[in-house]
Image: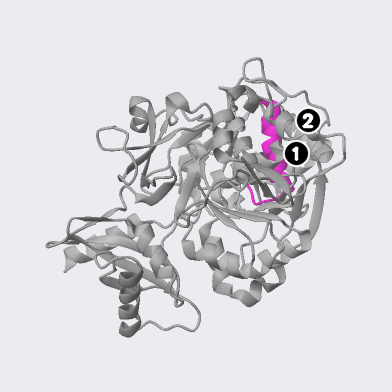
């Protein structure tokens, strides 16, 4: 069975699952996992010859510069020559501490051309976060710019620094002048072929609950990245694609940089910070048809109001959401005010995206659901003893490693990985299957609240809260209680024109009782100006819980 998307036939989901084969997936690559391939060739060289745009760069003041695949191929060769001159060899790790600029693209593609491994460093990191990641990976070189360079002076045993600087800025002793070296470097560098199990990225977990762990990414992950762009994003030649996620994190590096280029499609880098106004301007100016980002960004669009987005209503074809569960209210708002379907996608740094409401495959989309397993993955729900559960039985979402040919994660760098026991990868997220096979998200296992014998998922309570017109964002935790084990507490950010009051708090409690259930409403509500988040935008509920426990201990 097929449906249509953007005037094209859209395969049925179950047909796609039945037809999936690893041999067919391999056809999206020029190289071969066994005999050799190169990520720069797959994401750049093989798409040259038609003078097509590969990268659209917007400066903070929105000056546009476009680069073709031919120009990126030349830049990658120059960068590979610069890296090789510094002693970088295939398999070595180099890090990029850079904003979304063409130099970032040159660094990534140059490393891959050389057969090296690229490690992203988010520009909001402080010296200690950078130091931990560099020590974990053993990186041999860091490419950065003048504004980020001072952080590296505080990094113990910092590797060689390649600095991007203006002509009038000093070059610290020992640093490589990256821009000058690029200009002088040769424009030819034969791509180094590697095998599917060889690494091309070194990622880190987001550190939501502890120190970040190193996540090695092998070249065979390209198959999964390409499948996501095709089946879930539904990227096609007629699209103008913009993933607003920063390539300093997995969703940005996997799917704002690697994924679109792998399919031969252009991507967009905007160096400025996120605002609803700039996002709308860029969508309108560049004719963006496919947008990807996080629920946090989409809630900010909602907060800006319908009048802010009125100029782009009907311009987008599809919108994709990842990073945290997508609240149903966001789906309704996008339908009403942007006239576009927004679909929730689920994944992790360790496995990429693998449970999706697919734009490119035909299947029902239920608000509040993370969707269905992407073809090439078998997902299951496990109980505490590792047994697979059926519909409407809460447990931990896991990937069946024996029946998921696109799954590429095989363990953390130099660290035991208990999550892989028994042939499954356990995500640590509590979910349950619906009767149709779709996955409903409950929360991180550590976030699930137990109150008076009930298991309460914070996501459901948060979604009910943001349905209220006064609420822009909410985080829900369990607070220790001697009678109920825990009681539900909500931290609420209000929208413009709304004031915190006991009356509003009671109104919100009544709203959740009515929308959800009598036992899941937030007994305690704090109105706050912001919420603790990781640099990638994920709410750190464990910090809220820790603060509440400490408060109770002092009482």
Q: Position of residue 114 (x, y in %)?
A: 69, 27
Quarter of the image where one finds residue 375: top right
112 relative to 99, above or below: above
The residue lying furthest to the front in this view is 1
Which residue is denoted by mark 1 in the rendering?
Answer: 264
Which of 336 and 45 lies nearest the eye of the viewer? 336
Q: Does 473 sit left or right of 95 as displayed?
A: left
Can residue 96 be spotted in the picture? no
Residue 50 at x, y percent in the picture: 87, 38
Mark found first going from the N terminus, 1 or 2:
2
Q: Quadrant of residue 202?
A: top right
Q: CA distance from mark 1 to mark 2?
A: 8 Å
Magenta-colored stretch includes residue 104: yes
Q: Which mark is residue 46?
A: 2
- Callout 2: few (<14), some (14-19), or many (20+) C-alpha neighbours within 10 Å? some
Q: Provide the major secondary structure of the magenta segment.
A: helix
Q: Residue at x 49, y 54 (%)?
A: 535
- Local packing at callout 1 (Cα closer than 10 Å; few below 14, some 14-19, many 20+) is many
Residues rendered magenta in the picture: 98-115
Residue 112: x percent and y percent?
67, 31
Q: Residue at x 44, y 45 (%)?
A: 438
Name the quarter where the C terminus is drawn. bottom left
Q: Residue at x 68, y 48 (%)?
A: 4
Secondary element at tag 2: helix
Q: Nearer the viewer, residue 542 or 266?
A: 266
Q: Residue furthest right?
A: 50
In the rendered structure, are the residues bearing label 1 and label 2 in contact, judged by CB atoms less than 8 Å apart?
Answer: yes
């Amino acid at each position: 069975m097929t449906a249509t998307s953007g005037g094209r036939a859209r395969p049925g989901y179950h047909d796609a699952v039945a037809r999936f084969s690893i041999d067919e997936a391999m056809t999206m690559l020029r190289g071969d996992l066994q005999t050799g391939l190169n990520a720069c060739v797959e994401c750049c060289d093989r798409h040259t010859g038609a003078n097509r745009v590969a990268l659209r760069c917007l400066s903070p003041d929105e000056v546009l510069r476009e680069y073709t695949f031919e120009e990126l191929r030349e830049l990658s060769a120059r960068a590979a020559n610069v890296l090789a001159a510094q002693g970088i060899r295939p398999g070595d790790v180099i890090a990029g501490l850079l904003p979304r600029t063409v130099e970032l693209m040159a660094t990534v593609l140059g490393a891959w051309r050389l057969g090296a491994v690229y490690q992203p460093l988010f520009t909001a990191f402080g010296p200690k976060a950078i130091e931990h990641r560099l020590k974990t990976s053993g990186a041999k070189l860091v490419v950065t710019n003048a504004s980020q360079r001072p952080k590296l002076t505080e990094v113990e045993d910092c590797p060689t620094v390649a600095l991007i600087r203006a002509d009038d800025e000093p070059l610290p002793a020992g640093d490589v002048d990256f821009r000058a070296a690029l200009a002088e470097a040769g424009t030819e560098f034969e791509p180094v072929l590697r095998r599917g199990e060889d690494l091309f990225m070194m990622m880190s977990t987001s550190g939501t609950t502890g120190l970040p762990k190193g996540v090695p990414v092998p070249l065979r992950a390209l198959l999964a990245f390409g499948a996501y762009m095709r089946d879930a994003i539904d990227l096609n030649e007629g699209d103008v694609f913009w993933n607003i996620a920063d390539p300093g994190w997995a969703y940005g590096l996997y799917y704002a940089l690697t994924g679109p280029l792998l399919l031969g499609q252009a991507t967009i880098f905007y160096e400025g910070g996120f605002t609803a106004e700039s996002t709308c301007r860029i969508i309108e100016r560049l004719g963006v048809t496919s947008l990807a980002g996080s629920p946090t960004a989409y809630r900010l669009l909602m907060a800006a109001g319908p009048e802010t987005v009125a100029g782009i209503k009907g311009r987008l074809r599809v919108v994709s959401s990842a990073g945290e569960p997508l609240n149903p209210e966001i789906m309704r708002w996008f339908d009403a005010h942007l006239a576009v379907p927004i679909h929730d996608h689920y994944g992790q740094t360790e496995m990429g995206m693998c449970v999706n409401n697919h734009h490119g495959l035909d299947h029902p989309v239920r608000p509040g659901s993370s969707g269905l397993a992407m073809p090439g993955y078998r997902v299951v729900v496990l109980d505490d003893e590792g047994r697979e559960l059926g519909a409407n039985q809460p447990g931990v979402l896991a990937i069946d490693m024996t029946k998921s040919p696109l799954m590429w994660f095989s363990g953390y760098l130099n660290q035991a990985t208990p999550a892989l026991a028994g042939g499954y990868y356990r995500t640590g997220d509590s979910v349950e299957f619906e009767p149709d096979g779709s996955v409903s998200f409950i929360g991180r296992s550590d976030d699930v609240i137990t109150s008076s014998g009930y298991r309460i998922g914070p996501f459901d309570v948060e979604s009910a809260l943001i349905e209220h017109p006064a609420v822009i964002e909410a985080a829900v935790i369990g607070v220790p209680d001697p009678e109920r084990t825990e009681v539900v507490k909500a931290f609420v950010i209000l929208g413009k024109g709304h004031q915190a009051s006991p009356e509003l708090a009671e109104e919100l409690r009544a709203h959740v009782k009515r929308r959800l259930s009598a036992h899941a409403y937030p007994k305690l509500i704090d109105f706050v100006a912001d919420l603790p988040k990781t640099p990638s935008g994920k709410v750190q509920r464990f910090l809220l819980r820790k603060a509440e426990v400490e408060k109770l201990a002092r009482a």
